[in-house]
Image: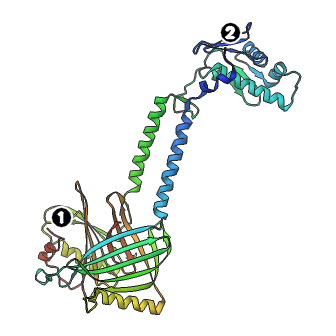
Amino acid sequence: MLKLTGIKNHNRRLRLWHVIAIVLVLVGIGLGAYAMTFNSKQLNLSCRAKLYEAPFKAESLPSYSQSLALDVKIAANHAKLSYRYGQNGQDLAALIYEGKVSALAPGTMTYKLNLDQANLKMDLLQTEVPDLMSAEVQKSRKALFEQGGMSFDMQIVDMDTLNNYVLIKFYPSGHLWACQNK
Amino acid sequence: MQIGTCWFNAQEQVLVDAASGRSWLLSADEFQALSLLSAQRGKVVSRMELLQVISPHLKLSMRADELLNSTIRRLRLFLGDDAAHLLVSIANQGYILYATPRKHSRTALNSPLFKLSMPQFIVLTLLTLAALLWVGSHITHPTSIAPNYAKQLLTHDGHYSEIQFYTGQPSDHSMRPLVDHFLEQVSACAVFPWQSIAATISTDQRFVSLVLKNNDANGLEFETIKMMSENFNVDVIDELWLIMVGICA
């Protein structure tokens, strides 16, 4: 003969709503992680480019190679952009901007940056600032003195996390960079 | 009396589950309630009638209601998983006891309360996880913003490559002649080894940025090229130059 206390184990069976509950929890976790991916202000990108100047003719190609690099580091509301100019694989000058992320628009994947500090670093053996950097320094100096800072947007145009590929574009300058997450 | 897979022995006040071989010794309340329900099986027995047989001294108090509810709950447990559904609650009226299972078309998926065996549960959970992973892999990667201009480039070797132009501003149509001029130059390639090119012309029109991309069995290969000129409109790009910098092959 059995009494009521012996029933508990007998009644423990899995039901369909257990599966439904598990699915809802997993979907919730997935959606949360997906939303965090786009709402996160953490970003650490490394971008490299080869640089060529006109005229674009085979006989005019210089004997040395020129390169531009950009490192983007965003942590919380702090943004740091480091541009480096190099020749034959050696960095000759770097221009480092720092400032704040004023906003992030997840819908368009756009970071709105407000940069108010700029530092120029050069190779000690270099006597002159490369032309490209010189123009950039003049432009940023003017913006910093006249407006107290530089405001621009950085938009993630294409992102393929499986292949560690991020394509970013800057407004209003219109520059495009293919980057890798560090 | 037979109730599903159970046998109700009224003389000994015992309910025997033939499926599991268990015998339940009924309390006075459980026996009275089950006796009344089985005497009127297939018909609604009101709560009032049941209350009168299990707790005549409690009348219509809250405690009597709780006593009836717990009695019905225990009877369902005694009847077991296969026969519990034979004791049916009728909202605002009472209860019906059926002696034999009623015809119903319940399947594993039409009721969230339907009980699953462990293999069914595991299979269903694995299928669900697989479906979630499949959906996740299709909505997460890649994510992209539409270009301002896109064009299929038919190269001399008969292949199509896509060129996507992003201008400095969202609606800057003044870039269009420059874009066309550039496309004409690039289409001179005899062999174009890239599947796609993403390109921008800077707002000051001094820089063209090209991101060349190939995605094949060896994985993703990409390269960024920046071209600098004081006037792209008049520049003529040499095909040999395109080959030497890796745009053409």
Q: Amino acid at mark 1?
A: Pro
* Label 2 or label 1, whichever comes before in sequence order: 2
- Image location (x, y in percent) of residue B226: 26, 77
Q: Residue furthest front?
A: A124
Q: Amino acid at mark 2?
A: Met
Q: Is residue B157 left or right of residue A159?
A: left
Q: Chain of mark 2?
A: B
Provide the residue designation for mark 1.
B193
Of residue B58 and residue B111, the one placed in the foreground of this image is B58
Disc on res. A2: none
Q: Chain of mark 1?
A: B
Which residue is located at x 41 percent, y 92 percent? A142
Q: The C terminus of chain B appears in which quarter of the rendering?
A: bottom left
The answer to whether any part of residue B87 appears in the image is no
Of residue B219 and residue B44, the one placed in the foreground of this image is B219
Disc on res. B1: 2
- Image location (x, y in percent) of residue B237: 17, 79
Task: Name the secondary structure under disc 1.
Answer: loop
Which residue is located at x 49 percent, y 33 percent? B121
Of residue B199 and residue B7, the one placed in the foreground of this image is B7
Given contact means CB atoms under 8 Å apart, are the residues at marks 2 and 1 in contact? no
